[in-house]
């Protein structure tokens, strides 16, 4: 367990020491989304009864920032180690593959939560937000950060360079995030796109997290958590199998 805690602490220090880039920068970017969309859309869009558009937007942006930063943390750390060659210092110690996985995912969760809490607190300056079911909110926040942390490890193991890393982030993670209902309710979409949204696992993360705030959602939170939990379990098993085999790490 000493190896796990040491690697976890090292990962925390890594993103904390460059906090301007890893914490403040995504915080400012997300707040710009909130400032622009709330100003333009507040009086034009009705989502849930009794919920203003700005209040609706805050949980979506909080979850979006958590997902993107959890993915960025594990993926950028591992790909940097591979490209610089210092990954050998992670492979030499008697560190089990599951400890490697746990340390990276835990650090991704911490960074995601730190950025998400920052966005949430800043969002209170724009509008008051209720908290109907805090346990549901926390469950989806942890599940989302853990899921994206595992995806980050898989991506970094597969990628042979920064361009492949950027391709996954720009062509998979970002579109899935933006099309998950951060800025709208899927009930406002045409039937085809509404049905297609149910195949996006990020939609269940956003919708379930928003349920924790308002007590209303597009699908039941139990179903959402089941789907998200299944996705996390599948990603975790795949990541552990890759780490155990040493895929693109030991050769």
Image (cartoon, rainbow, N blue to C red):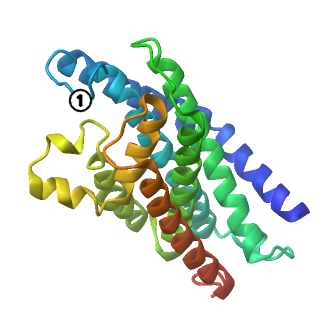
Q: Residue furthest right?
A: 2
- Tell me the SS state at disc 1: loop
Q: How many marks?
A: 1
| Horizontal side of residue 124 vs 23, given as left or right | left
Q: Nearer the viewer, residue 233 or 87?
A: 233
Q: Position of residue 7 (x, y in %)?
A: 78, 58
Q: Quadrant of the rendered structure where residue 163 is?
A: bottom left
| Residue at the image point whose x is 39% and y is 49% from the top | 220
Q: Which is nearer the eye, 23 or 182?
A: 182
Q: Position of residue 100 (x, y in %)?
A: 73, 68
Task: Indicate left or right for 175 with 139 as reference.
Answer: left
- Residue 185: x percent and y percent? 24, 39
Q: Quadrant of the N terminus?
A: bottom right
Q: Residue at x 51, y 25 (%)?
A: 131
**Mark 1, residue position:** 47
Residue 50 drawn above or below residue 8: above
Q: Residue at x 73, y 76 (%)?
A: 97
Relative depth, front residue between 47 and 87: 47
Q: Is the residue 20 above or below the residue 38 in the image? A: below
Q: x, y (%) of residue 239?
A: 58, 75
Tell which of 215 and 109 is nearer to you.
215
Q: Residue at x 36, y 22 (%)?
A: 55
């Amino acid at each position: 367990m000493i190896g796990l805690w040491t690697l976890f602490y090292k990962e925390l220090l890594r993103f904390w020491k460059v906090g301007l880039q890893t914490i403040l920068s995504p915080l400012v970017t997300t707040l710009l989304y909130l400032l622009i969309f709330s100003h333009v859309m507040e009086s034009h869009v009705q989502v849930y009864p009794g919920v203003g558009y700005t209040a609706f937007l805050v949980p979506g942006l909080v979850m979006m920032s958590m997902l993107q930063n959890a993915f960025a943390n594990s993926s950028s750390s591992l790909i940097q180690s591979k490209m610089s060659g210092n990954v050998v210092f992670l492979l030499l110690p008697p560190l089990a593959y599951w400890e490697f996985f746990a340390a990276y995912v835990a650090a991704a969760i911490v960074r995601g939560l730190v950025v998400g809490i920052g966005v949430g607190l800043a969002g209170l300056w724009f509008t008051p937000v209720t908290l109907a079911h805090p346990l549901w909110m926390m469950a989806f926040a942890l599940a989302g950060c853990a899921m994206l942390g595992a995806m980050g490890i898989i991506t970094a193991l597969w990628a042979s360079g920064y361009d492949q890393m950027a391709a996954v982030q720009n062509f998979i993670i970002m579109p899935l995030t933006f099309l998950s209902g951060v800025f709208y309710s899927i009930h406002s979409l045409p039937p085809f796109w509404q049905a297609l949204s149910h195949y996006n696992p990020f939609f269940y993360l956003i919708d379930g997290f928003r349920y924790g705030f308002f007590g209303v959602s597009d699908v039941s939170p139990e179903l959402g958590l089941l789907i998200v939990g299944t996705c996390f379990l599948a990603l975790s098993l795949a990541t552990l199998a890759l780490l155990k085999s040493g895929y693109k790490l030991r050769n």
